[in-house]
Amino acid sequence: MTSSQPRRGRPRRTGSHLSVRVAHTVLGGAVGVMWLVLPEMTSGAGVPVAIKEPTPAASTTAVAVTAGDGGRSTVDLVLPLVAVGTAGAAAGYAYIRRVRRTRGRTTPGGASRPPSGQAPPQPAALDEEACAALVAADDRIRAARCELGFAEQLFAPQDTARFRRTVDEAGAELAAAFRMRQRYDEGVPQEEAARGHALAGIVGRCAEAQALLDAASAAFEELREPGRASGEALVVAEGRFRELTGRAGAAEAVLAELRARYAPTATAGVVGSVEQAKDRLLFATVRLNEARQSADSAQPVRAARQLLAAEGGIDQAAVLLEGVDRLAAELRAAERAAPVALAAAEAEVSRARAGARAGAAHEHEHEHGETESGAHGGGAGAATEAGAGPGRQVAVAPADASPELLPARLLQADTTLASIRRQLPDLQPPARKPGSRAAGPDSHRRDPHRQDPPAPDADGPETAGPDAAGRGPREAGWDPVAVLRRIVRATASLASGRDEALQTAALIAARTATAAAADFVETHRGAVGALARTRLAEAQRLLATGDPADLAPADALALEARELAELDVRAHGNPYGGPDHTAGVGGAVLGGVVPAEDPDGGTPAGFAGPAAPAAGG
């Protein structure tokens, strides 16, 4: 895609414009001078002009001209002066106008640039176009995946493989566009022209994704048409509908069990999911009945449209119900991982503290000039004492922990981990006998960096101590995923990043947050904007890299995506939830199953693109 903006590095033409104007000025001056000297060269028709000495009587008068000259000198002086003045004024005006236009220019090729600390102006129109292109392409690819999923249940894999490749290729183009948008939001690139080109690239990528679906649209319709005509596609959709209707009751029971066992924050992501799934199934019921009636009355176009809308509602109901089951599995996995992750985090903090102590002892020896190893158990000897021996690791201070900030970080980690341990009553350390000390490599000395954490916990309601009824926090409800997230964040600046238990904790937290955000965007895409979708796409990309360093950013981006999506939904509202519309239409519009412009007769844009309702049904 080409751009009308000037290309960077193109040579300026200011010098050429100025040289042309200077040449015009010189030429005008030369013409004026020639005009001045021409009368003197031709005066008297070749008769020499006598120059007489002035007489006393005529000393106060000018030299007279003969009557034969006819007053030529006065006329010949006026016209050349007018010509020279006019040429000079024109050249001066052109030069001043050129300088003013150059100074006022704000493009990258201009003489003046904005200050380095000032952000370049954002091309608002192109930015809106890029956001709209991302939303449109994302909606269409999601709808195409839904269509393809039902087609794969009806046809052999070899018949649908090419369309799966098409959807994957379109998804890759969209993923690249989302990646470009994420970098754009992060301020990369910084130059105005480059940012404009980035937005144009996003629009181009989205257009390419839709073009891939357009190219496969006719072939996909040919594949599905026989199944629709024979009624087999309707039978597949009805079978899937009955399966999900039976699962709704089971999902409701699972959700009730989760709410009784865990804190409200643990199940906040699926609150209302069962009700929304039932609403989508109610919408699918109406559309399946209309599709059956249209097929019986020989209206194949209307039957296909109603079937496609019913498939969209059924697919979203499956997403909502599967989200409940997946969250239950993630909470159980987090509950099992929490004790192991907590022990690993405490070990990491102990290693960091031992490394800090070894570094402090080494610095103390260096200040007093004690360079011999092992003289007082400092330097390398301290590190050996802390971590040497069979089955032990050498204590090393974190690479990014400055000596000034390390004590505060250790205190914060101690406070957080102690709070978490109080939240897990069955993980309390065994009671020690009076006068006994805890076993460990450092039990023989007082830790100068350690401070006793405060007894009350201020981390939130889910970390509170026993309630008034005497129940522990475990019985009152807790959030295992949130506990893992707090463990990972507490040791982020202290841990080496190589402990498998902490990596597992970070993976569970990021995977749970990303899946919850993805389900919410999928089932509310009729109201979710480009920003939330961009953050979700980046979280999914980081989660798929397999790099443990990407887990914490993926978790944070997924949480941000969910928050932004919820804000979009609240701001959008639902004007189709009243009694004036067919049952379930409000949820279908909110989920993007049917377009808001025509909720009763329209269909989402899938392989074939947006379809307009046929006249007269």
Image (tube, helix red, strand yellow):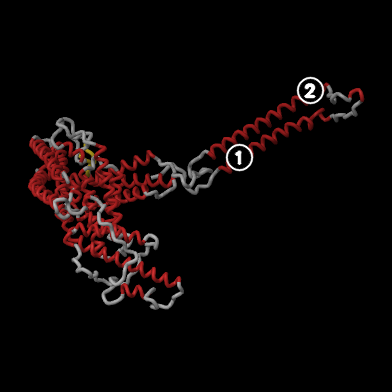
Please identify the quarter of the rendering in which residue 132 is found. Answer: top left
For the question of whether residue 547 can be seen, the reply is: no
Badge number at residue 20 = 1
Q: Residue furthest front?
A: 434
> What is the C-alpha distance between the residues marked 2 and 1?
38 Å
Q: Earlier in the sequence, mark 2 or mark 1?
A: 1
* Image quadrant where one finds the N terminus: top left
Labels 2 & 1 near each other (Cβ < 8 A): no
Q: Quadrant of the C terminus?
A: top left
- Secondary structure under tag 1 reads helix
Q: Secondary structure at mark 2?
A: loop
Is 458 in front, or is 241? 458
Residue 68 appears left or right of 587: right
Question: For mark 2, does the 10 Å Cα neighbourhood hold few (<14), some (14 to 19), or many (20 or more) residues?
Answer: few
| Residue indicated by mark 2 | 71
Tell me the quarter of the picture where residue 56 sits: top right
* Nearest to the observer: residue 222 or residue 154: 154
Q: Is residue 480 visible?
A: yes
On screen, residue 179 versus residue 19, left or right, reads left
Q: Provide residue 120's location: percent of width, then percent of height.
A: 44, 43
Q: Is residue 363 left or right of residue 220?
A: right
Residue 593, relative to residue 325: is it above or below?
above
Residue type at mark 2 is Gly
